[in-house]
Image (cartoon, rainbow, N blue to C red):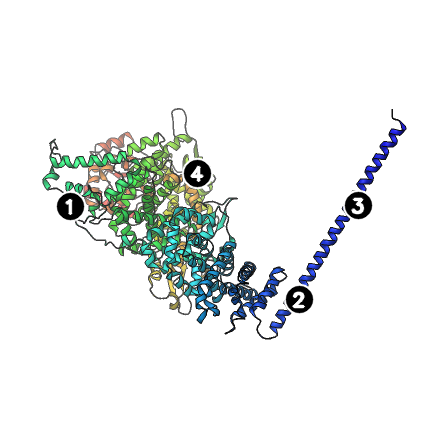
């Protein structure tokens, strides 16, 4: 292998290599040690030098504090240079403060040029160094301002100091060196100041001022003094003014300064002279000019999050309220920029909470990050936003509409309005063509097939062809053509006024602004609506404006807009939405006196016209299939228009203002609708869901009965050839009818309750009553049960004062298991409606509204329903609303004392107590105080909260007191009757469904559907007498008593007597009821041939209401029949099962 010499050689080389590496490592260690020693010595030297310099600076300020002679500017410059050389914010903050005070003190010296710190700027050798030094010092001032908290007293003094430094050296107005002979130096000094200001701007002066102003103002009580706020805002203005409002500086001013929460509000209170500067430079106009460009406005909004965008908007609105002249001249631009800001915020407004949303006190759920530090200032920002819907701005924005007078104009043919300058050239030709002589108008109406070939007609037709071709060809500007033609043209002549196309566009833009604010500022939506409805003449004039867009309120134009996804169509529809939202809000808060008697805002004739337009518009939207796939703006439009329509419809149902059949659609045939329902067409279902009132009431009742029949067939409750329905048998003691019925029926399932129930009565002797129940006995049982439970003496229900209508008793809780009783009552009532059995139970209107679920609507007003409970109580409450003075000065306490058993209610006015948000009730001799809101008995009623008090009191009386009872009854009722079935009916219609038609009895219909027994027939002498007596001798009231005598209900069935079950029957009887064994061959023959066993003159007619059967003796004289029948119905002769 290897020799010895080779091995020793390798070892030697390896040994030499290791020695060389060790020497290199040692050198590196020595070099590192030297470097470390050098750094340490350098550090120690610097530290020693810094200590010496700081000691020197401290001695300088110590000597200055001792009150020795003023230091020269050069000395201050040198000491400042040393401090800036080693400056550290935390370590040298006190030294920097003393330096600033020393510099400011030097600037205050009188006639001592060498002392003035700014004098060094005139030295050729020191000018550049001085400029750099002052820039550095002023930026250090900004850094301190960024960290200081102005709410702390000590730090607020430092804020004032550093702001004074910035104010002093960014403007030459306070420099004493420039007085007198030094005035010639001012241009140069101004240039230096501009240079300094530019440097600060580049480093972020506006961001510093934004932080300072936000900390000082974004709180319930601002902590910036007048001097501090004046200085900060003056600093913010200087760069913009110096740059002559260039776009590069207007943008940061808007983003950082004008977005400070409620800045303009604080300026107007604390230092209004600063706002005078803003107005003198016409800055609002410059802001509008800058922001009206969409790209600039979007850029500014994207630089701010939602809260700061609202703050900027609030400040601009406040400035606008202070400069109405500017707004009048710049309305279009101002409306445009506000709309763009709201649209930006709207993108992030959501309806629901999620992991990506945050709660905002004005915007609601917001999907952008929210600066919660601004929440404290949001009330002030909201007050600024209120300028948008304040009267002054509304008057400015809607000046074109409000300036028009609402007058009754002459017919269209006699109006000759002046033509605006920007009307289409062909317009006059069109007008002249249509306004030709009467002979031409007669030619336009073909009579007897005469040809229309006159030159005038041909001319008009050619013009119409031109416009129709333009509409079908220029599809993307179709709405512009329609609006441009109608706005100044023929259809506008109906009112005698014209708006030019620019005015239409302006009004549409303003409406878009307000509609966007409603959908964006979700948490103050009601405030906006209230502000927009404050002026009584705005909405009527806006409606007049809408009407001038074409015939029937521009119906065709708005329907055209639905099929066009253009900007113009969206604007027109936004105008319609705004009108609907505002009008709905107004009518909701107006009481009946204001609507029907005072006719505030709208006359009743206008409400008729509006409701006709809305009815047609909603119907077209549904029938044309627009609603089926609607979403986004289209869905919002439908909800808005439909909501306004239903508010008017429900108001009309409560108290009529529209003519008969006003709500029906004559172009909708019920047969067509029923066919579409059978085919499960969506549009037919939507008609029933949203506007069932367009179908005649009788057809809806027929549809309701068909729905019930279909459900019975589906559940197997109808007798068929192959199966019989399950029958539930119950035994009822007449002496304990309610108790037995409750015990045996409340446990039944929903299916069994809807099925066949057979009743066997047990009389007072414990003997089963004769007879077989074929629905008639159950009808009697149901009627008796309902009669007993609704008897006010039982105290389950009470009657209203005046018309004595029923509603749940607030003190019904004295009954054991009272909620189960109410649920049972609801089931019995539902069963009666389900089986088509009419029961004479008049309910209070407000209770029927709750049965229909109207009280869950956001537009439901308890005050409107209050007269149906207690008209006197309603008058007393509304007198508070109309009281012009200060409610709190009256020294009144309003309490409502209720004698539970005697049903006595009264108002008491006690002079030594004030009206409070509470309700006092006398419950069985014990006075109970109900607070309408938590702590209400300690809250006085004032002019500010009296409206809330009225609504709270009405809501308490009609809802809170009977909430549990009503909920239980509704639960039982809906277990039998589906809610979607009853939604087809209004409140009075539901009452008719329960109690029958309130129309006069149709004797011909009754005669047509009467069944005769016992030998009677339609031509029988007694029967002829009977119908003649009812028609000629009886009054309508007596005819109602007759019907109640036979059927137990004074009202006829809704669909006529053909739907009365069992059918109305008349039977000839020879003996008394207790001897009556039914018809025999002999009795029938005697009745048929008018053969009497004996004269029945002493007997009275009787009835079996369970069978709707009249038992009539075979009287020999008509006068005897009249006398006996009148006596029987007036005495309500009793009966027993036959």
Q: Between label 4 and label 3, give the one nearer the viewer.
A: 3
Label 2 element class: helix
Task: Find disc 4 in the rendering and name its residue.
Answer: 731
Q: Using a 10 Å C-alpha cutoff, classify the residue at mark 4 as few (fewer than 14 neighbours), some (14 to 19) or many (20 or more).
A: some
Q: Between label 1 and label 3, give the one nearer the viewer.
A: 3
- Cα distance, mark 1 to mark 2? 99 Å
Mark 1 or mark 4, which is nearer the start of the sequence? Answer: 1
Q: Which image quadrant is residue 382 in?
A: bottom left
Q: Between label 4 and label 1, give the one nearer the viewer.
A: 1
Question: Which disc number belongs to residue 55?
Answer: 2
- Cα distance, mark 4 to mark 2? 112 Å
Task: Find disc 3 in the rendering and name its residue.
Answer: 26
Residue 797 in the image: state x and y as whole percent: 40, 50
Is 957 placed left or right of 1100 in the picture?
right
Q: Given contact means CB atoms under 8 Å apart, are the residues at marks 1 and 2 in contact?
A: no
Question: Which disc number belongs to residue 975?
Answer: none
Mark 3 or mark 2, which is nearer the start of the sequence? Answer: 3
């Amino acid at each position: 292998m290897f020799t010895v010499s080779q091995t020793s050689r390798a070892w030697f080389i390896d040994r030499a290599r290791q020695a060389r590496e060790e020497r290199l490592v040692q050198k590196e260690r020595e070099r590192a040690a030297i470097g470390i020693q050098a750094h340490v010595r350098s550090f120690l030297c610097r530290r020693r030098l810094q200590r010496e310099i700081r000691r020197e600076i401290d001695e300088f300020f110590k000597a200055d504090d001792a009150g020795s002679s003023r230091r020269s500017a050069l000395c201050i410059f040198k000491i400042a240079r040393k401090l800036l050389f080693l400056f550290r914010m935390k370590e040298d903050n006190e030294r920097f403060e003393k330096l600033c005070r020393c510099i400011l003190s030097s600037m205050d010296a009188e006639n001592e040029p060498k002392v003035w710190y700014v004098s060094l700027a005139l030295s050729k050798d020191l000018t550049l160094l001085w400029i750099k030094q002052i820039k550095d010092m002023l930026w250090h001032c900004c850094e301190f301002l960024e960290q200081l908290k102005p709410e702390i007293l000590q730090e607020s003094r430092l804020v004032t100091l550093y702001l004074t430094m910035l104010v002093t050296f960014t403007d030459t107005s306070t420099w004493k060196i420039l007085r007198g002979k030094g005035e010639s130096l001012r241009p140069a000094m101004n240039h230096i100041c501009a240079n300094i200001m530019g440097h600060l701007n580049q480093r972020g002066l506006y961001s510093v001022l934004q932080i300072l102003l936000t900390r000082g103002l974004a709180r319930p009580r601002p902590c910036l003094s007048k001097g501090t706020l004046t200085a900060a805002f003056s600093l913010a203005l200087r760069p913009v003014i110096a740059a002559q409002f260039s776009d590069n500086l207007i943008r940061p001013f808007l983003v950082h300064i004008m977005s400070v929460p409620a800045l303009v509000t604080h300026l107007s209170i604390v230092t209004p002279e600063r706002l005078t500067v803003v107005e003198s430079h016409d800055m609002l106009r410059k802001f509008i000019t800058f922001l009206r460009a969409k790209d600039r406005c979007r850029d500014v909004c994207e630089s701010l999050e939602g809260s700061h965008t609202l703050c900027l908007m609030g400040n601009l609105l406040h400035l606008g309220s202070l400069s109405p002249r500017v707004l009048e001249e710049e309305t279009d631009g101002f409306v445009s920029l506000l709309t763009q800001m709201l649209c930006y915020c709207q993108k992030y407004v959501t309806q629901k909470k999620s992991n990506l949303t945050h709660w905002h006190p004005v915007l609601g759920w917001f999907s952008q990050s929210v600066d919660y530090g601004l929440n404290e200032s949001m009330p002030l920002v909201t007050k600024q936003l209120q300028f948008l819907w304040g009267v002054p701005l509304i008057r400015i924005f809607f000046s074109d509409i409000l300036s028009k007078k609402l007058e009754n104009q002459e017919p269209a043919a006699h109006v000759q309005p002046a033509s605006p300058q920007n009307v289409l050239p062909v317009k006059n030709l069109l007008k002249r063509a249509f306004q030709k002589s009467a002979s031409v108008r007669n030619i336009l109406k073909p009579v007897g097939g005469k040809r229309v070939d006159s030159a005038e007609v041909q001319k008009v037709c050619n013009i119409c062809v031109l416009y129709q071709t333009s509409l079908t060809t220029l599809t993307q500007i179709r709405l512009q053509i329609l609006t441009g033609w109608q706005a100044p043209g023929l259809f506008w002549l109906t009112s005698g006024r014209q708006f030019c196309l620019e005015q239409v566009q302006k009004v549409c833009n303003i409406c878009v602004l307000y509609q966007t604010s409603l959908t964006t500022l979700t948490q103050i939506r009601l405030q906006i609506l209230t502000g927009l409805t404050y002026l009584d003449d705005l909405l009527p004039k806006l409606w007049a404006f809408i009407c001038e867009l074409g015939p029937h309120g521009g119906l065709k134009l708005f329907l055209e807009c639905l099929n066009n996804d253009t900007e113009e169509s969206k604007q027109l529809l936004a105008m319609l939405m705004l009108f609907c939202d505002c009008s709905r809000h107004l009518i909701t808060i107006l009481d009946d006196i204001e609507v029907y008697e005072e006719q505030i805002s709208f006359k009743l004739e206008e409400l008729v016209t509006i409701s006709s337009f809305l009815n047609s518009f909603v119907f077209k939207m549904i029938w044309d299939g627009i609603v089926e796939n609607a979403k986004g703006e289209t869905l919002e439009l439908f909800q808005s228009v439909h909501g306004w329509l239903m508010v008017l419809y429900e108001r009309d149902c409560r108290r009529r203002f529209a003519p008969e059949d006003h709500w029906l659609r004559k172009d909708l045939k019920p047969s067509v609708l029923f066919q579409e329902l059978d085919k499960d067409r969506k549009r037919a279902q939507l008609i029933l869901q949203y506007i069932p009132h367009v179908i005649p009431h009788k057809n809806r009742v027929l549809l309701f009965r068909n729905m019930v029949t279909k459900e019975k067939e589906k559940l197997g409750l109808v007798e068929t050839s192959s199966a019989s329905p399950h029958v539930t048998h119950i035994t009822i003691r007449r002496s304990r009818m309610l108790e037995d019925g409750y015990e045996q029926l409340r446990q039944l399932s929903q299916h069994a309750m809807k099925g066949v129930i057979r009743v066997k009565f047990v009389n007072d002797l414990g003997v089963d009553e004769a007879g077989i129940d074929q629905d008639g006995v159950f009808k009697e049982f149901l009627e008796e049960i309902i009669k007993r439970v609704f008897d006010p003496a039982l105290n389950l229900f009470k009657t209203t004062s005046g018309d004595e209508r029923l509603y749940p008793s607030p003190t019904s809780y004295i009954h054991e298991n009272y909620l189960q009783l109410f649920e049972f009552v609801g089931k019995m009532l539902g069963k009666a409606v389900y089986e088509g059995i009419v029961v004479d139970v008049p309910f209070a209107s407000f209770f029927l509204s709750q049965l229909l679920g109207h009280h869950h609507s956001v537009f439901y007003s308890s005050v409107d329903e209050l007269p149906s409970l207690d008209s006197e109580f309603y008058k007393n409450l509304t007198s508070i609303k109309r009281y012009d003075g200060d409610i709190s000065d009256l020294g009144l306490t309003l309490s409502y004392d209720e004698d539970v058993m005697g049903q006595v209610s009264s108002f008491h006015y006690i002079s030594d107590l004030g009206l409070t948000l509470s309700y006092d009730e006398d419950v069985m001799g014990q006075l109970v105080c109900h607070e309408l809101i938590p702590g209400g008995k300690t809250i006085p009623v004032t002019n500010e909260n009296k409206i809330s008090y009225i609504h709270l009191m009405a809501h308490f009386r009609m809802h809170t007191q009977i909430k549990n009872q009503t909920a239980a009854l509704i639960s039982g009722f809906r277990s039998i009757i589906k809610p979607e079935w009853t939604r087809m009916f209004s409140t009075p219609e539901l009452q008719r469904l329960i109690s029958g038609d309130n129309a006069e009895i149709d004797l011909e219909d009754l005669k047509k559907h009467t069944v005769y027994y016992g030998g009677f027939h339609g031509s029988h002498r007694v029967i002829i007498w009977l119908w003649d007596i009812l028609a000629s001798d009886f009054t309508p009231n007596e005819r109602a008593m007759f019907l109640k005598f036979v059927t137990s209900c004074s009202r006829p069935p809704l669909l006529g007597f053909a739907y009365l079950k069992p059918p109305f029957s008349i039977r000839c009887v020879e003996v008394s009821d207790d001897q009556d064994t039914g018809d025999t061959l002999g009795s029938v023959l005697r009745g048929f041939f008018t053969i009497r066993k004996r004269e029945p003159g002493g007997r009275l007619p009787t009835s079996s209401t369970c069978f709707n059967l009249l038992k009539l003796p075979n009287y020999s004289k008509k006068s005897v029949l009249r006398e006996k029948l009148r006596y029987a119905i007036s005495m309500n002769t009793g009966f027993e099962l036959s």
